[in-house]
Amino acid sequence: KNSDTDGDEIIVGIIGDDSEKGKKKKVVNPYLDLLQQRMELARKAYGSYHVAALLCKRDYSLWERSGDVASKIANIYFDAIKYVEKHPVPSSGESQDEEFVDVTNNVTSKSKKFNPHSAGVDELKSERISWIEHTRNAYESADLLRPNGAEIPCKLVQAHMMLENYLEAYTILTKLEADSKGNGLMESYSCYLLYADLMVRIGYECQIWNDGTSHNRAYMFKRWLRKHSRTFDWKERRLQALS
């Protein structure tokens, strides 16, 4: 059956010999199949880059690529969370174990594939956070090698922001701005837009902290909020970044 919504199932083939034709039909969800393919390729790519980075520790580009792929895996988990929230009931025939038949050797084997429904929303969210942490760690390793430009520090800032480590992100951007005097590190629009976005998030955290509704668990950031939540001029800083 076909539908305009993502996640509807379609019949793509028949399992069994000619005598069983029409009795067993393999049901495939096209969107889930796409998620599985993306996850499989991304995990292989991450493994390759991460191992290469460990073997060549002084090559920052390998750490950067490892972080890029880890970020893509986190995005796949985000798509999977949205998919499960939209389709809480698994499609008929959906299973974590899928059969692959080698026609030449007449051998059937089972392989576990990424299945959002088997994991559940809570586990998917936990895995997404874990991959964002992998992203941050890889960018930190790349940044320790002091590459030229501001691209890797900005990627590190984005990873910290996704983990709600706003104080660490603010420290990196402040240091980057101080070091950019005379060498143009902060001359790109993306750096200033990232800084402006960070100011909005810190401003929101200051507001909910003052209202007594903050749930941020970062110990150092909470200490910072106690001292600066009422005096931090995030609006002025944001306007300066955008001007």
Image (spheres, rainbow, N blue to C red):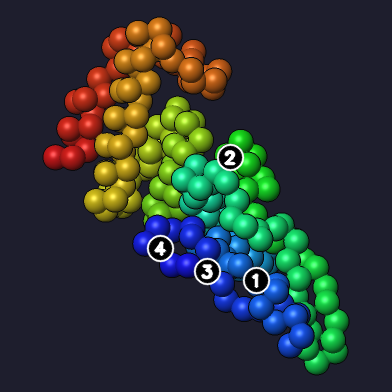
Is residue 128 placed above or below 70 in the rendered structure? Answer: above
Residue depicted at x 35% and y 25%:
202
Residue that carries the numbered disc 1 in the rendered image: 26
Q: Label 1: state its secondary structure.
A: strand
- Are circles 3 and 1 on residues that touch, CB within 8 Å? no
Name the foreground residue: 12 vs 151: 12
Name the foreground residue: 116 vs 154: 116
CA gap, disc 2 to disc 3? 24 Å
State which tag comes first along the sequence, 4 or 2.
4
Residue that carries the numbered disc 2 in the rendered image: 121
- Are circles 1 and 4 on residues that touch, CB within 8 Å? no
The C terminus lies in quadrant: top left
State which tag comes first along the sequence, 2 or 3.
3
Residue depicted at x 32% and y 15%:
207
Q: Dot 2, how many residues are within 10 Å of its Cα: few (below 14), some (14-19), or many (20+)?
A: many
Is residue 166 toward the left or the right of residue 65 in the image? left
Q: Nearer the viewer, mark 2 or mark 1?
A: 1
Residue that carries the numbered disc 4 in the rendered image: 3
CA gap, disc 4 to disc 2? 24 Å
Residue that carries the numbered disc 3 in the rendered image: 10
Q: Label 3: state its secondary structure.
A: strand
* Residue 155 visible in the shown view: yes
Residue depicted at x 40% and y 32%:
170
Residue 153 image point, x, y percent: 44, 47
Q: Amino acid at mark 3?
A: Ile
Q: Nearer the viewer, mark 2 or mark 3?
A: 3
Q: Amino acid at mark 4?
A: Ser
Q: Amino acid at mark 2?
A: Val
* Residue 67 visible in the shown view: no
Q: Dot 1, how many residues are within 10 Å of its Cα: few (below 14), some (14-19), or many (20+)?
A: few
Q: Label 2: state its secondary structure.
A: helix
CA gap, disc 2 to disc 1? 26 Å
